[in-house]
Amino acid sequence: MKPASVGPSRVEANGKGISAEDLAAEEWPFVSRYLDVEGNRIHYIDEGRGPVLLFVHVGFWSFVWRDVVTRLRSEFRCISLDFPGTGFSTASTAHENTLAANTKVLDAFVQRLGLENLTLVMHDLGGPVGFGFGGRNPELVRALVISNTFGWPLAEYKWIKRVLGLMSGPTMTTLNRRFNIVARMSSGRFGVGKQLSRRAKRTFLTPFRARSTRETWSELIGDPLRIEDDLAVIDRLLSTVLRDVPVLTIFGARNDPYDWQGRYARTFSHARPVVIEKGMHFPFMDDPERFSASIRDWWRDAVI
């Protein structure tokens, strides 16, 4: 049973409160739901019926999954949450903008909804969070879909560490706080915007009108540099307690310079790779039809 909404949360921007209910229905074709989790007001969607797909992305908001959810909700129950301080979720004063804190939020969110037999669909910083949750709750995990993310320390990936250090550094943090650089860049064709209309891009950008949302992103993007030990634990969980679950990896052809798909193939016993031709960092936005069809076909072949 889906819990009742607890009422919308509003993100303060330019002296005005913004909520998901202000979005145009044609750009946000979902019922926005709200739940108090760990003292945070969480905005989430819960669409369709069937096996549960839990979409996990940390830093941006549930809009990134929009075009996949609309294609899969006729066959799956599709759930996605905005983590505290992102999208239309608000964070308590006690919440820390770390991956570890968000893993606890995900755990509590799953418990509140009474979810089980989960297929986690993870991207970017959602990988460490989803893997951390799944490795500690393997009895709740049925399968994994992994998209352009990692589950190990980044020490050997020097270029990635430099990029994360630059993006989370004081200069970029200040520029992003003042000018919303990251979200604006990410709304372009090399980010989420390849298939989006101008109006849809504006919808994606809506929560980033709040400076607090931009600050949350800047803190989160630097966290992998501070948690090498935690990432080493996650790496061990992948190769032990999660090793034998069905896995689908979907990467953009132009955004896997270190062959992380190959690393996943060596880590898991049953991993199927899919490459999105000309795909970048958000393959589910570059080609939502292929991304969705890949999940549907793999589920029928390897999970049921």
Image (cartoon, rainbow, N blue to C red):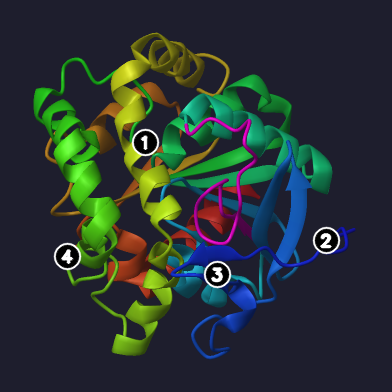
Question: The residue under label 2 is which amino acid type?
Answer: Val
Say whether residue 244 is visible: no
50 sits left or right of 253 in the view: right
Between disc 3 and disc 1, whose residue precedes? 3
- CA–CA distance between discs 4 and 3? 21 Å
Alpha-carbon neighbours of circle 1 within 10 Å: few (<14), some, or many (≥20)? some
- Tell me if residue 273 comes above or below residue 231 in the rendering: below
Between disc 2 and disc 4, whose residue precedes? 2
Q: Quadrant of residue 197?
A: bottom left
Secondary structure, mark 1, is helix
How many numbered callouts? 4
281 sits left or right of 87 in the view: left
- CA–CA distance between discs 2 and 1? 28 Å
- From the image, state whether disc 3 or disc 1 is nearer to you: 1
Secondary structure, mark 3, is helix
Contact (CB < 8 A) between labels 1 and 4? no
Magenta span covers which residues? 78-97
On whether residue 96 falls in the magenta region, the answer is yes
| Picture residue at 62% right of the left edge, 36% below the top | 93
Q: Which residue is mark 3?
A: 69
Provide residue 214's location: percent of width, then percent of height. Answer: 36, 52
Question: The residue under label 3 is which amino acid type?
Answer: Val
- From the image, state whether disc 2 or disc 4 is nearer to you: 2
Provide residue 3's location: percent of width, then percent of height. Answer: 87, 58
Q: Which residue is mark 2?
A: 6
45 sits left or right of 217 in the view: right
Q: Which residue is mark 1?
A: 219
- Tell me if residue 146 comes above or below residue 290 in the rendering: above
Secondary structure, mark 2, is loop
Question: The residue under label 1 is which amino acid type?
Answer: Glu
